Image: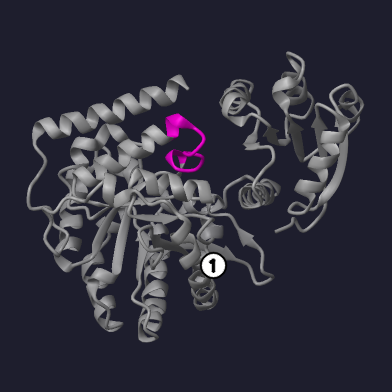
Amino acid sequence: MVLPEDIDILVIGQSKALATRLCRMVGRSLSGHYQPCDEAGADSFLVANRYMVLILGNASGFSPGFLETIQQQQPQARFLMFETDIGLHGPLLDQQASRINMDLVSVLPLPCPPERLEAVVERLNTATLEHAVDRAPMSLDEVGAAVEAQKIRAWYQPKVRLSDGQVVGFEALARWLEPDGTMLPPRLFIPTAEDSELIIPITRKLITDSLTELSDWQSQGFNLKVSVNATVEVLNSRNFIDWLDQSLSHHQLSPSSLVIEITESRVAGKATKIVEHLTQLRQLGVGVSVDDFGTGYSSLLQLSRMPCTELKIDRSFVSGASVKEERGVLLRNSVSIGHGLGLNVVAEGVETRADWEAAARAGTDEVQGWFIGKAQPAERVLTWLEDWESRRALLVRETRTYAEAKNPKPQDADPTGWRQHQPSTVQLAVLVLMMVLSAGLALLF
């Protein structure tokens, strides 16, 4: 993928020859006007121009203070770094960039596997495009008008089972599309909607879209599920459970084909207010997923008492877990917690083959992320399913999956997904301690 307009990119290497090689390598994926130079020759370019992207080759060998100088002269830029010895220097550069508030997209190995570079460039493209959009959130009136005009619709990101690569379903994500094809990032309208009652019609629209498409896919022989996010306000809205039941009946769909996701941070401190609604969803047969797990671990004891069927591990614990040990620790412990509570565990943010394998080694059940597929409109889903099937057999055959051997799932759940045995106080204490220790490791590193 390339940006709609070429951008200015400065590439600084330990030598100009290295910078030139990096220009050729990255230029295959990212369109732009590239300027290669070494550290000694960089000053004139840094002072005279403003760059949207800076690429640094073997930055660990730069002079002390040079990264701070670049950051001060190019505060608006986004950075990519490449390191020959990424195992030694990658974590140190990542920490240094964080310390000086450098907008670092990723530290990549040199040489870099094409698929890993593609995933990072894709993320860079998306972030750069969003950066170009006015950062001010849309007003309440603007969002309301978009809802009225049916501009907000569902796009679908695939979820696959790690053991065999089979597609198990999709997550429905809100996308605002203008008539000219412009797509506004969710961060510009979802917060406004969540602070008002507009999130209720938006969520119902996503569910209606999803059930319509799901009915069509199932009629063509695809046994799929769809997940939709719902806030506490949506769950508390008038007749939501009855409306959902009627919608499933209208589309002649089994309730088990729908999963309602609720963000962990929104559950914390409010479990007693929403557990009744979640219980009603489970009694109806609808799945319940706790999203972004790991960002609000202080609510673990509350979560253990909730009628959940699934745990989605936050992408910050997954992306890069193969090269950042602290993330690997958090990922493995999160999977242990989910399985200890008898839940299906999904890893979000799988962007590379290395992320896929890290999730497999950790024992996750399902994965979701750009390595599998991006969010897409419904009309592209069937074509994507065909393309994925051609990738699946090779991917699964080559992936070393340790999930069953190292993390067998508990056998104490009945077919409805209800846990027959609640974990003991000692078990919960151990799980909480694991997460606290993991969070402490993350802060240290």
**Is 230 contained in the magenta span?**
no
Q: Nearer the viewer, residue 280 or 42?
A: 42
Kindly tell me whether residue 349 is visible in this rendering: no
Please give the name of the residue rendered at 17% of the width and 61% of the height, measured from the top-left corner. Answer: 282
In the image, taking residue 358 as reference, residue 15 lies left or right, namely right
* Quadrant in the rendering for residue 4: bottom right
* Quadrant in the rendering for residue 201: bottom left
Residue 136 in picture, x, y percent from top left: 61, 45
Range of residues picked out in magenta: 316-327
Scheme by which the image is coloured: one colour
In the image, taking residue 268 as reference, residue 65 lies left or right, namely right
77 over 286 or under it: above or below: above
* Count of numbered labels shown in the rendering: 1
170 over 433 or under it: above or below: below
**Is 317 contained in the magenta span?**
yes
Quadrant of the rendering where the N terminus is positioned: bottom right
Please give the name of the residue rendered at 22% of the width and 33% of the height, measured from the top-left corner. Answer: 431
Residue 252 in picture, x, y percent from top left: 27, 83
Residue 377 in picture, x, y percent from top left: 53, 71
137 over 35 or under it: above or below: below
Please give the name of the residue rendered at 36% of the width and 27% of the height, measured from the top-left corner. Answer: 439
Kindly tell me whether residue 335 is visible in this rendering: yes
Q: Residue furthest top?
A: 64
Q: Amino acid at mark 1?
A: Gln
Residue where numbered disc 1 is placed: 376
In the image, taking residue 124 as reference, residue 361 lies left or right, namely left
Residue 224 in picture, x, y percent from top left: 35, 72
411 over 433 or under it: above or below: below
